[in-house]
């Protein structure tokens, strides 16, 4: 019985790890629904983290003629200046894709800026980088 219980707990933990493969945020902003997905959860420092952005209009139709920019930053800390990075995206079908390379672990602020129809909409969130 004890072995069965241990096996069941291990399977549940393994399923949780598999389920949490990506980091995803969906927010409504400026008449759009923006979904941002990072391919690693948690994101990692010192290597590429692929980011995918999907922008949908109020009718749920993919917006493929926007300009999407990803800003990510870490505030200054004692003995260390603030770090600010920007990356542009490339359109692949209805997906905007880019890479983020976090220079160190810790809490980072991410702002995904969508410029479309003469207006700018921004989705903000934080990630804990390992």
Image (tube, rainbow, N blue to C red):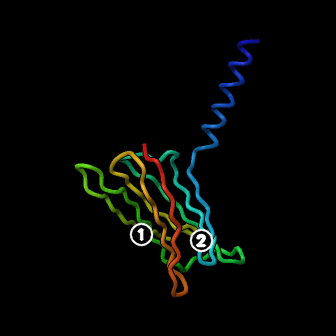
In which quadrant of the rendered image does the C terminus lie? top left
Residue 112 vs residue 97, the one in the foreground: 112
Q: Which mark is residue 88?
A: 1
For the residue labelled by badge 1, is the local secondary structure a helix, a strand or a loop? strand
Q: Residues within 10 Å of mark 2 (few under 14, many from 20)?
A: many
- Relative to residue 116, is residue 88 drawn left or right? left
Query: Percent from the top left, x then y, of residue 28?
Result: 63, 69
Query: Percent from the top left, x then y, of residue 76?
Result: 30, 55
Residue at the disc numbered 2: 55
Q: Decide: is 53 above or below 115.
A: above
User: Extreme right residue here?
Assistant: 1
For the residue labelled by badge 2, is the local secondary structure a helix, a strand or a loop? strand
In which quadrant of the rendered image does the N terminus lie? top right
Residue under the image location 48 percent in, 77 percent down: 67
Q: Residues within 10 Å of mark 1 (few under 14, many from 20)?
A: some
Residue under the image location 59 percent in, 73 percent down: 29
Q: Decide: is 36 above or below 48.
A: below
Residue 47 vs residue 113, the one in the foreground: 113
Q: Decide: is 13 above or below 59.
A: above
Residue under the image location 46 percent in, 47 percent down: 128
- Relative to residue 80, is residue 86 drawn left or right? right
3D distance between C-alphas at marks 1 and 2: 15 Å
Query: Percent from the top left, x then y, of residue 68?
Result: 48, 72
- Relative to residue 88, is residue 2 drawn left or right? right
Q: Which mark is residue 39?
A: none
């Amino acid at each position: 019985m004890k072995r069965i219980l241990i096996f069941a707990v291990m399977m549940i933990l393994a399923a949780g790890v598999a389920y949490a493969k990506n980091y995803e945020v969906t927010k409504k902003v400026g008449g759009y629904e923006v979904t941002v997905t990072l391919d690693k959860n948690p994101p990692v420092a010192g290597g590429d983290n692929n980011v995918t952005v999907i922008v949908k209009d109020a009718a749920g139709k993919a917006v493929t003629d926007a300009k999407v920019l990803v800003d990510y930053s870490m505030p200054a800390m004692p003995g260390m200046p603030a770090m600010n990075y920007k990356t542009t995206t490339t359109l692949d079908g209805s997906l905007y894709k880019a890479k983020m390379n976090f220079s160190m672990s810790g809490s980072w602020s991410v702002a995904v800026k969508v410029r479309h129809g003469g207006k700018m909409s921004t989705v903000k969130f934080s990630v804990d980088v390992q």
